[in-house]
Amino acid sequence: MTTAHAAAPLRARASRSLTGRIGVPGDKSISHRALILGAMATGETAITGLLEGEDVLRTADAMTALGAIMTRAGEGAWRVSGVGTGGLSEPDRVLDHGNSGTGVRLVMGAVATTPIACTFTGDASLCRRPMGRVLEPLSRFGTESMGRAGGRLPLTLRGAANPMPVVYASPVASAQVKSAILLAGLNAPGRTTVIERESTRDHTERMLRAFGARVDVEPHEDGTAVTVTGEAELSATAIAVPGDPSSAAFPLAAALIVPDSDVTVEGVLLNPTRAGLYETLREMGASLDILDARDAGGEPVASLRARFSALKGIEVPPERAPSMIDEYPILAVLAAFAEGRTVMRGLKELRVKESDRLVAMARGLAACGVAVTELEDGLIIEGGGPGSMPGGVGIATEMDHRIAMSFLVAGLAARAPVTVDDSAFIATSFPGFSELMTRLGGSLERVNR
Ligand code: S3P
């Protein structure tokens, strides 16, 4: 979707009830990492449950351009023949990561300590997002780069020929920054450490260990120190990708606000660094059950059952933000259907996602008739309770899949339909979203412009 595409408006209208048992596509974060680490390992990595969304397919394409061999054996079943750490080869084309910040930042890390030149680009949304947060720490390995002001894409990076190991205290709570540094550290001598003030998703650490790398996680006076031992030999492994909790959030949220609903999503990743939304929903009084909790390939997984609930507004603890960072747009919709005030703060990072999500949610909710205040680092939402949202508007999704899905969920419970201007970006993370919501009983229809 880097080149101009035909916008696909989609309308959601009040639905009777949502019921059923479903699965959601594979976790996006784990899918990117499986392809990247598979490409940097020796041997053949077998992946099942891979998210075949636009973002992840761009990563597959980039790793192919860097020399790995990717074979699709069936739906979500991929085989990756890797080139070994340090074995990535210079691509003869520009690496276009489309809408994906995770894809581009992790691949930059993966190439940063191999002496090859790579040029990266993305769509209009990605070209607005800051890359300096990754380029600055990578420069400490000896990586050179030249991009637009603020390190923005398109940019060219030349990997370090004689990399130095790095110790980096990250000023932003970002798993993408942490992961880029750890991936760069794989091909540097010695120990590379990232110090995190707040812990962010730890899929890179878990998966590096599964591929045989040494990763140490230790308390540090400024938080947690995550260290990878470099010149690592990664060995191919099998990876089963669990369902994405950030995608499961949408059908579960819809069930909480559409009367008489009862929806179960099976096989959802419940890694504690990703499960903040579910803790928050329980505090809001949601009927949410965790069933069949188990360990699947080193990650906790469970089925989640949500039923229509009388939600109440709460103050969301700001320190919970890293574990639910992608879930604030849908939480903001739920807060509008809760009784009373919800305050969410500590969310400056939302301004540099696929869109400025604080602006997009504040504007969209206000248009839907909700009383909302935009703060510098958050939102205050005055919830009116079940059935309170007037709706009846069109929403600008700003090339942001989660803004599109959040307002479609709102429309399923609003008094008048909600139309999003472009649903095409939903395919970056949740292909089949509208079919799946329709199967549950949601009323979604394409709109001709
Ligand atoms: C991700 C990290 C988060 C998150 C993104 C996926 C990852 O971004 O918002 O959707 O897979 O590492 P930040 O690292 O910018 O917080």
Image: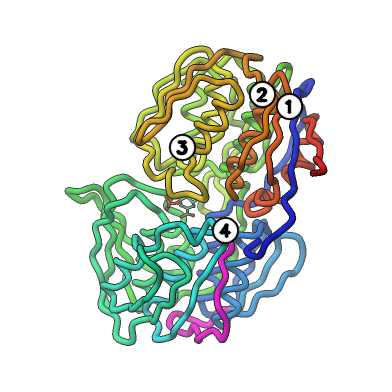
Q: For the residue carrying disc 1, how many other residues have a C-alpha within 10 Å: few (<14), some (14-19), or many (20+)?
A: many
**Element on which disc 1 rests:** strand
**Sequence-earlier tag: 4 or 3:** 4
- Residue 286 image point, x, y percent: 56, 20
- Residue 64 image point, x, y percent: 60, 78
Q: Which residue does the numbered mark 2 point to in the structure image?
A: 391
- Disc 3 to disc 1: CB gap under 8 Å: no
Q: Image height check: is 111 above or below 219?
A: below
- Disc 2 to disc 1: CB gap under 8 Å: yes
**Sequence-earlier tag: 1 or 4:** 4
Q: State which region is magenta.
A: 82-99
Q: Which residue does the numbered mark 1 point to in the structure image?
A: 417
Q: Is residue 224 left or right of residue 203?
A: left
**Element on which disc 4 rests:** loop
Name which residue lies at 52% across and 44% down. 300
Q: CA distance from mark 2 to mark 3?
A: 19 Å
Amino acid type, label 3:
Leu
Which quadrant, please, contains the C terminus?
A: top right
Q: CA distance from mark 1 to mark 4?
A: 28 Å
Q: For the residue carrying disc 4, how many other residues have a C-alpha within 10 Å: few (<14), some (14-19), or many (20+)?
A: many
Name which residue lies at 73% across and 27% down. 417
Does the Cβ of the disc 1 residue fall within 8 Å of ligand 1?
A: no
Amino acid type, label 1:
Pro
The disc at residue 358 is 3
Q: Is residue 292 visible?
A: no
**Element on which disc 3 rests:** helix
Q: Image height check: is 78 above or below 241?
A: below
Q: CA distance from mark 4 to mark 3?
A: 19 Å
Residue sitting nearer the eye, 117 or 222: 117
Q: Which residue does the numbered mark 4 point to in the structure image?
A: 99
Image quadrant where residue 43 sits: bottom right
Task: Characterize the magenta stretch by its predominant secondary structure.
Answer: loop
